[in-house]
Image (cartoon, rainbow, N blue to C red):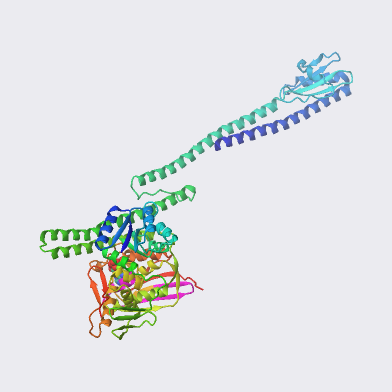
Amino acid sequence: MYTAAFMVTVGVIGWVTVLVVSDTLERQAQRGLENEASALVDEFKAGGRQDLEAALAGRFANPLTHIRYVLIGVDGRALLGDETLLPYGRDPAGSVASRGAGPRTAARALSDGSRLVVADDLADVRHVEAVIRRAFLIALVIAGALGLGTGSLLSTALLRRLDAITRTAEAVVAGDLTQRITHTGSKDEFDRLAVTLNRMLDRIDGLMVNLRQVSTDIAHDLRTPLSRLRQNLETTNRRAATLDDYRVAVEQAVEETDRILDIFSALLRIAQIEATTLRKGFHPVNLSELFHTVADAYAAPASDGGRTLAADITADVWVQADQDLLTQLFVNLVENALLHTPQRSTVTLELSVRDRSVVAAVCDDGPGIPATEREKVLRRFYRLERSRYGPGNGLGLSLAAAVAELHGGQLTLSDAQPGLRASIAFTRELIL
Amino acid sequence: MKILAVEDDALTLALLVSSLGEAGHEVEQAGDGHTGLTLACGRAHDVAVIDRMLPGIDGLELVRRLRAAGVQTPVLFLTTMGGISDRVDGLEAGGDDYLVKPFAFAELLARIHALARRPPLGRVETVLHAAGIELDLVTRRVSRSGQTVDLQPREFSLLEFLMRNAGQIVTRRQLLESVWGFHFDPKTNIVETHMSRLRAKLNSNGEPDPIGTIRGAGYLLHALMA
Ligand SMILES: Nc1ncnc2c1ncn2[C@@H]1O[C@H](COP(=O)(O)OP(=O)(O)O)[C@@H](O)[C@H]1O
Ligand SMILES: [Mg+2]
């Protein structure tokens, strides 16, 4: 396509060049003819017919000239010179500027009634034209060849890069999510496409890894209570003697089933929260009141467990939120602080405000979470080694993180020196 | 009690009908929204138990139409474990309570009783009496056998809910919802902790415990105790 356009351009330039050059040359030739004719007329005026014929004879003898002459008598016959020029003498007034075919001519009428025609076949001009034409033709051929050559070079490069993308895509389809499209770093469209596609693949890979991890974890974490359930039922079947034995066994089985169902509903809830983007069901929520309710609910259990629950709550702080989810978020954090700390620990609920930003935090002075584990505990089922055999299912912080994110915040775990500080920043809702 | 059960899962419906029947209730049943709506409009029920997901018209729409038609039957929604705004959606459609499947039958029964016992609109009680306890909702004073009992606000709410449902079993979940507004299951025994404090205060002068604990179900305030 580009090649064709290029060649047409070269062709047009060649054609115009030929036109201009030959036109210039022809004008020049015409001027030369007129001068020659005038010079011969001058000879005639000076020395009559005799001198003219002598001058012509001299001209004829010159082997280098392309100019032809004819002297036409009153009867219309050629007196001297080239007879083929007779038709050009019919117009005595002057020249017949004949373009293209035939020679260029200049004609003069002499005072004795005869006429003189000077003609040039323009062989030189035609020759120059031919040379130019040939030059352009060669240029055209070379340009065409080059154009086609570079064109095909370009398209092979494009094809190769598309091929790289296709191959990667096929590898991914075949299940190898580690493949990435190689890019040259040239920042052209193809590179940008490759980078974007690679980012997409990274995201998919991340989701897949997450999915795989979650399903393995679910399988693993549900196996334990399910095996326990099965074990108990089997033992009961073998050993139970009295109705009471059976009753106890059934009660235990129901409890175990409830634990399994709890895991399921927590997982479902997390998945649902993570999948929610529309903040449907959001209302202005009095966060101060919510904090007081949570502090209030846990003060008694905390002191029963030998811990202190303190609160430092700024009054009248409102945020746009889902009240139920937000309550569960802070309940999870407080329960962690009560569950994963030794007796005599203090747990503090803090709600502070700076301008329009609200920071809600639950702090304790227990063992805290090592910096390297802070990211991991947010994962489903992940629990620190020391808490693996205690109560809980490792889903509390996952849910808290999902709820925080739904509210446009982020659950941040940090060192309370000593202990854990879990905080979330919100945007304050101004209630008038 | 006359109860309407609308549930599309045949097994769940059969279980509902037989269990409620055993508990001494008269049950009308429907397997889809249209039948449910016809039955609900046709005859007065004390409580309607309605599944949210129904063929034909779904549970939410059914209740919206019921309310639009002026039927005030208390409605208990059933849902599968759920959507994050299910509870609010149910209440906005005109439902009165909400229970997530799977549930313990005791939980369902307790909620049905609580709904049926709600005081009719317009009648406002300011002082509750039960088991020799007097609870003044206006002054927020509580006394047992004439002796003043000092309660924390949550202990007061706990007792209030028990007294409103005196003689009926109330569940841990009902208390969590009504007293603390917790619509989920915390790991900590909040209810137990507060209940034992409430009991200690009520029984401080050696009187018998008016609150019974029903294993696997909940608590019960003995209505007729002196
Ligand atoms: N306040 C805390 N102090 C110390 N460790 C904590 C604290 N909160 C959470 N953790 C650690 O993080 C893990 C994950 O917490 P979570 O997701 O709530 O699961 P669960 O509490 O059910 O074990 C816990 O098992 C515990 O090891
Ligand atoms: Mg936890």
The percent position of residue A155, horizontal first and vertical second, equals 48, 39
- Residue A254 lies left or right of residue A280; in this view the side is left
Q: Residue at x 43, y 67 (%)?
A: A321
Query: Is A345 in the magenta?
Result: yes
The percent position of residue A34, horizontal first and vertical second, equals 80, 27
Query: Is A64 in the magenta?
Result: no
- Residue B218 lies left or right of residue A89; in this view the side is left
- Residue A298 lies left or right of residue B69; in this view the side is left
User: Residue extending furthest front?
Assistant: B43
**Is residue A132 shown to the viewer in this render?**
yes
- Name the residue nearer the viewer: B103 or A57: B103
Q: Residue at x 28, y 65 (%)?
A: B109
The percent position of residue A324, horizontal first and vertical second, equals 38, 67
Number of callouts: 0
Magenta extent: A331-360
- Name the residue nearer the viewer: B63 or A16: B63
The percent position of residue A145, horizontal first and vertical second, equals 53, 34
Q: Quadrant of residue B149?
A: bottom left
Q: Is residue A56 above or below residue B203?
A: above
Q: Is residue A175 above or below residue B113?
A: above
Quadrant field for ligand 1: bottom left
- Name the residue nearer the viewer: B177 or A343: B177
**Is residue A345 shown to the viewer in this render?**
no
Q: Residue at x 24, y 66 (%)?
A: A388
Q: Quadrant of the N terminus of chain B?
A: bottom left
Q: Is residue A354 above or below residue A381?
A: below
Q: Quadrant of the C terminus of chain B?
A: bottom left
